[in-house]
Amino acid sequence: MKPADPPATVRAPGAGSAGPEGRRDRKDPNLAERLREAEAALVRRPRLSIRLRMVASLVLCFLASGAFSLGAFILLRKAEVKLHLLQTLERLDDRLLRVRALEDEKILSRADVDRALDGVRQADALLRSGSHALQEADRAIVPALLLQLGTCDRLLSVVRGAAEVGGRPGALSARDGAELRRAEAEGNRLLEVIIRRERSSLDGILRFAETGPLVLLGLQLVLFVGIILAFAKALVNPIRRFEGYTARIAAGDFSFITPTRRYRDEFSDLAVGVNQMLGELQAQQHRLVKGAKLAVVGTLTSGIAHELNNPLNNVAITTEALMEDLPTLSDKEKWRLLQDIYFETERASEIVKSLLDFTRQEKGEMVAVDLADVLGSTLRLAQNEMNLNNVSFTCQMPPDLPRVRGAANQLRQVFLNLLLNAIQAMPGGGRVWVSAGPQDEGKVCVEIRDEGTGIPAEVLPRIFDPFFTTKEPGQGTGLGLSVSLSIIRTFGGDMQVVSSLGRGTTVHTCLPRADEG
C-alpha cells in the first residue's frame, strides 16, 4: 500500500512584523487625523536637503584644495625669498673676507672695493626690505648687522673716493683701518650666525616641501572619506529604513512613518508620499474587511433564518395553544407554556445577539481580549451551520487561557471564516476540533482542524492570495483567508496551514499575549 503524502505546510509570509510604532498608530481610529499628524511631524522639522549638503561638500573640497594650494605657494615663496637672502649674505660674507685679506696684504684693488661696497649696499637694502623672512632670533641681530654694514659702507666709500681721485685705492688712517677691520670682523661673525640659522631653516622648509604634499594628500583623503561617509549616512541609512518600511507594509503593517531625525530632507518628502499611500491602503483594507464580513454574513443568513424560524414557530404554536385553551388550563400549565415561550424568545435573542456582535462596528484599537469568550461566541454563531451540514465539533481550552491583544469582533470574523472553511471542506459531514493554549515567546495559539478533503500541495502556497478560491462560482469570493491573514498580521500574529489531500486541514493561528497587570 502506497503511504500517504506528508501534509504540506504553508506559513503566512512576514507575519508578526508589526512593531510598537504600528500598534500606537492603530490606537487612534481617526485615519485622516492620524495621517495629518504624521505629515505634520515630518514637515515641521528644519529642512536640510541632500542637494544643499552636496553643494556644501563640493565647496568645502574646493576651499580645502585652494587652501592647500595657497599654503604650498606661500611655502615655496618663503623658501625662494630665504634662498635669495642667503645667497646675497653669503656673497657679502665672501667679499668682506676678501677685502680683509687683500687689505692685510696691501694689494686691495679698486674692483675689490667696488664689489665689496656693492655687496654691502645690496645686503643693507635686502635686510631692510626682507628682514620679515628671517627667523625671530635673526631679526634681532639685523640692527647690529646693519650698523656694521653702515660702518663698512662709510669706510669703503672713503677708500673708493680716494681711488677715483688717484686711480688707486687710498689708504685709511690707522684708526679708520682698525675700525674697518673691526666692523668687517663683527659683520662676518653676525653674517655667519644668520647664514647658519637661515640655512638650517631653509633645510627645514625644503624637508617639509618634500613631505608636505604627502601630508596634504592624506588630509584631502581624510576629507573625502569623511564626505563619502556623510553622504553614505545621508543616503544609505534612509534607503535601509525605507526597505524596512516596505517589508513592514508587505507584512500587512500599514502604520504611518514617523520622524527619526531632527531635520528633514528629500526622503522626508518621500515619507509624506508613502504615508498618503498607506492611508489609502488602510482605507481600502477597511473596505475589504467590511466586504468580506458581508460575504460571511450572507453565507450565514440562510442558516440563521432557519434557526430563527424554529423558536418563532414554537412561540407561535405555544401562544396559539395558550390563547385557545386559556379558560381550561390550570395555573401550572399556563406557567409551563409561558416558560416555553420565554425560553424560545431567549433562544432567538441569543441568535440575533451573536449576529449583531459579529456585524457591529468596532473602534480600531487593540485591547486585551478574552480569547475563550471570542471562540465560544464564534462557535455558537456557527452552530446552526454545523447542524445543517452534519458537522460536530470538539473544543478544548484550559480554564486559565491568557488574554491576547486584538479586537474581539475582528477575531470573531477570523475564526468564523476558518470554521466555515472547515465545514465546507466536509460536504458529507464530519468533525472539527478546536483547541487553544499558550505557547512559548509570549504567544497564545488556536488550532482548528477538520477531517475534510484537504488542499493539494500545488494549491497550498496560493491560499492567502486575494480572490483566489477553489470553490465553485458563487460559493466564495476568495477573500476569507486573505482578510483573515491581514487581520492577524495587524495584531502582530502569525498563521500557518498544514494540509494534504484526503487527510484534512489544520490551521494554526498565534497571537501575542496581552500584558497583564
Image (spheres, rainbow, N blue to C red):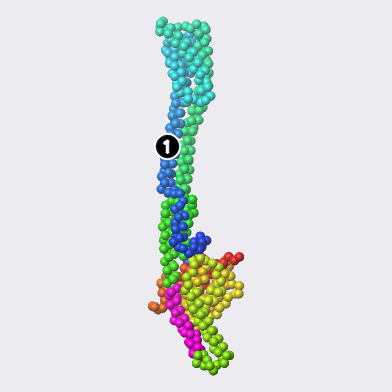
Inspect the image, locate mark 1, and give the three-letter code of the amino acid beneath it.
Answer: Gly
Residue 283 drawn at (x, y percent): 43, 65
Residue extending farthest to the front is 327
Depth check, front residue: 490 or 142: 490
Depth check, front residue: 194 or 390: 390
What segment is highlighted magenta in the picture? 293-321
Task: Name the residue at 44% across, 71% down.
Answer: 290
- Position of 58 compared to 506: left or right? left
Q: Is residue 243 visible?
A: no
On the image, numbered disc 1 is attached to which residue? Answer: 66
Q: Quadrant of residue 441?
A: bottom right
Q: Is residue 490 magenta?
A: no
Q: Is residue 8 above or below residue 57?
A: below
Depth check, front residue: 269 or 470: 269
Residue 395 drawn at (x, y percent): 56, 78
Task: Name the residue at 47% across, 68% down.
Answer: 486
Task: Name the residue at 43% across, 46% down.
Answer: 53
Q: Is residue 20 above or below residue 100?
A: below
Looking at the rendered image, the quarter that the C terminus falls into is bottom right
Q: Secondary structure at mark 1?
A: helix
Q: Is residue 428 above or below residue 22?
A: below
